[in-house]
Image (cartoon, coloured by chain):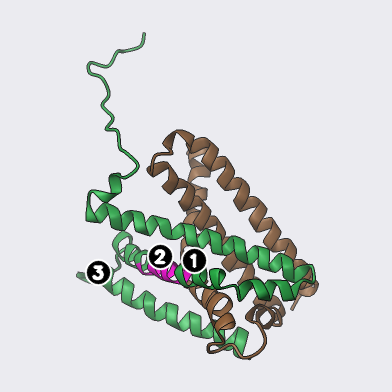
Chain colours: A brown, B green
Amino acid sequence: MPQVARLHAILWGVFSMGGFIAAFLLPVLIYLVGIAYPLGLWPVAGQDPTTSILDHRHLGTLFLFVTIAGSLYHGIFRFQSTLTEVGLARAKRALEAIGYLIIVIGILAAAYYLLLLNPSVLSLP
Amino acid sequence: MSKEKPFPEYRRKLGPGWWLSNRHFTQYMIREWTSFFVAVFSLIYIYELSLFASGAKVDALNLLRNPGIIAFNVLALLFTSYHALTWFYLIGKIQPIKMGKTTSKPWQALLVNIVLLLIISYAVIEILVLR
């Protein structure tokens, strides 16, 4: 298989994995953080959900990283592809470059902030 | 020597609103636009984490209580759920499972994955929030 085709297959594979993550893990995170907490709905009582999740050290940090990184990759990859279908086909290369830049910076930033919030996550559980 | 094509290549030009002309195209495009909400929520949450990490937890929590952000999050949940349901249906269409002489239908994959989604969501709440 040519190298470009292999890279293409890997990128689409990661996109597909991100699709599963966004489907199975993102809805509950949006509900907890963005709706249940500000509106005082079940199951959030008092403490904000991000702090509750991060209190679970390895598992909580892993959950947040996988959910955010997978969803960001899937969302940006699909969104830039959608833009080419609504009249921006000529800017395909530029959109791809901007998209991958946002993905890389976003994932690195998420990893960095989660490490700052939970430095012990690198040690064994 | 390069061979000349016997006829010019025809490429149909599509305007930005081509997906409004057919119900299936419109559904397809709505499904694709769910990615906007998935991406923007992820970016907002990374910003939230940056505020948490820099000690500005109060600002992060105030941002979550902003009515505009709450409205966006409600929309994001609706679109993400739509993404989940269409994704589950697609799995059943792309990769049907053969069991003897019968082959699974897309709606069966949809049902099984909805049950799985509910179990995973409850497990996340039970293990990471309630404990």
Residue B41 visible in the picture: yes
- Give the residue number, with chain letter if any, for mark 1: A22
Which circle marks residue A7 in the picture? Answer: none
Could you tell me which chain the residue with mark 1 belongs to? A
The local crowd at label 1, few if under 14, some if 14 to 19, many if 20 or more residues have their Cα within 10 Å, is many
Residue B119: % across, % down: 46, 83
The amino acid sitting under disc 2 is His
Residue A45 in the image: above or below residue A70: below
Q: Earlier in the sequence, mark 2 or mark 3?
A: 2
Gap between marks 2 and 3, in whole Å? 19 Å
Q: Secondary structure at mark 3?
A: loop
Q: In this figure, what is the number of numbered marks?
A: 3
The local crowd at label 3, few if under 14, some if 14 to 19, many if 20 or more residues have their Cα within 10 Å, is some
- Give the residue number, with chain letter if any, for mark 3: B105
Q: Please give the name of the residue rendered at 36% of the width and 8% of the height, measured from the top-left corner.
A: B1
Where the C terminus of chain B falls, by quadrant?
A: bottom right
Residue A72 in the image: above or below residue A26: above
Residue A101: % across, % down: 62, 46
Could you tell me which chain the residue with mark 3 belongs to? B
Q: Please give the name of the residue rendered at 67% of the width and 86% of the height, measured from the top-left corner.
A: A47
Residue A40: % across, % down: 57, 87
* Image-quadrant location for residue A57: bottom right
Question: Is residue A67 left or right of B95 when viewed as pictured?
Answer: right
Q: Please give the name of the residue rendered at 24% of the width and 55% of the height, measured from the top-left corner.
A: B24
**Are dots 2 and 1 in contact, CB under 8 Å?**
yes
Q: Which residues are magenta?
A: B76-85
- Give the residue number, with chain letter if any, for mark 2: B83
Residue B128: % across, % down: 62, 84
The amino acid sitting under disc 3 is Lys
